Image (tube, helix red, strand yellow):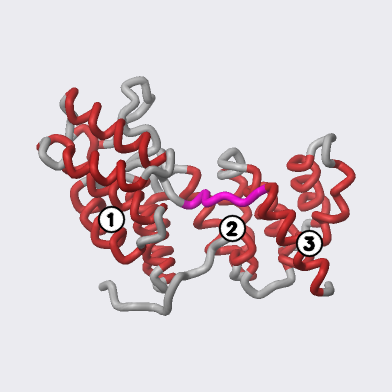
Amino acid sequence: MDGSNVKALRKAWLLIFASNGFIVSASTDKPFDPGQATVSIAELQHPLSGKAKSMLLKAQAALQAGKFPECLQDLDQAMKIPSAIPYVYGIRGAAYLASGEVAKALPELQQAVQVLPVPGNYSNLGYAYFLSGDRDLGEEQVRRAIESPNAPLQARFLMGLLLLDRKSETDEACDDLDRARDLMPSVHMALAVCYARDGMEDASNSEIRQLLGTTRASMFEFWKRWVTSVAAEPDPAVAFGLRPHSEPTAHR
């Protein structure tokens, strides 16, 4: 594929699908939703007061809106409320991750899994380790997240991409990506790449068509070429934004 085509594909990807889907933007999937079906043992051990819940919801909303300074200020106030403290570490770690401050995110998330060992915290810690260059330790933490029946879709997506680079583990990668398919559109494209790497052309084409729908059906050949090109790469996960920020460092 020549340089102009590669640039066109990258531009199209950024316009249509670009999104950071790896970060769980709270300490659990729906940590402060009283209507949720299940609550972890860890959360039962740390019940929230009404004031703590209100403050954490405010911080979480700021995080999801990309207002990181405001989020961190709210969390500083929440730290003054004893019942909020176990939750603050996970949300603050997610805020640092989302703002690209991985070095600050790591200690927060390390503390988070100690005081509130829930899937979202393990997943974010795994992502932070990966970004800092420790792929093995990152994968270990993400595996802890997906072992839970309440595993966030972000953890499944992240694990699928981590395994996508290993040809020998394509089946497991495709399974994790399939379970994360409802997270965001780009998961379908990752699954298409996974199927292509596994020689399942019909399944790969089906994912592309599902994603494009009828309104963008004319772009099928364009995206099929993109999928084929990415599937042939030794590290296809890079195409979905999964790349470390630095060389491995000591965390253990």
Q: Which residue is found at the position 35% from the left and 47% from the top?
A: 68
- Give, as a three-letter code, the residue at label 3: Ala
Give the residue number, with chain letter if any, for mark 2: 173
Q: Which mark is residue 8?
A: 3
- Give, as a three-letter code, the residue at label 2: Ala
Q: SS for tag 1?
A: helix
Q: Position of residue 50 (x, y in %)?
A: 19, 23
* Residue in front for this viewpoint, 149 or 71: 71
* Residue in front for this viewpoint, 27 or 72: 72
Q: SS for tag 3?
A: helix
Label 1 – label 3 distance at C-alpha: 38 Å
Magenta includes 126? no
Give the residue number, with chain letter if any, for mark 1: 109
Q: Nearer the viewer, mark 1 or mark 3?
A: 3
Q: Position of residue 149 (x, y in %)?
A: 41, 40
* Residue in front for this viewpoint, 22 or 143: 22
Instruction: Give the magenta part as a residue range.
Output: 17-22
Q: Main secondary structure of the magenta part?
A: loop
- Give, as a three-letter code, the residue at label 1: Leu
Q: Quadrant of residue 206?
A: top right
Answer whether labels 2 and 3 touch (C-beta < 8 Å).
no
Upstream in sequence: badge 1 or badge 2: 1
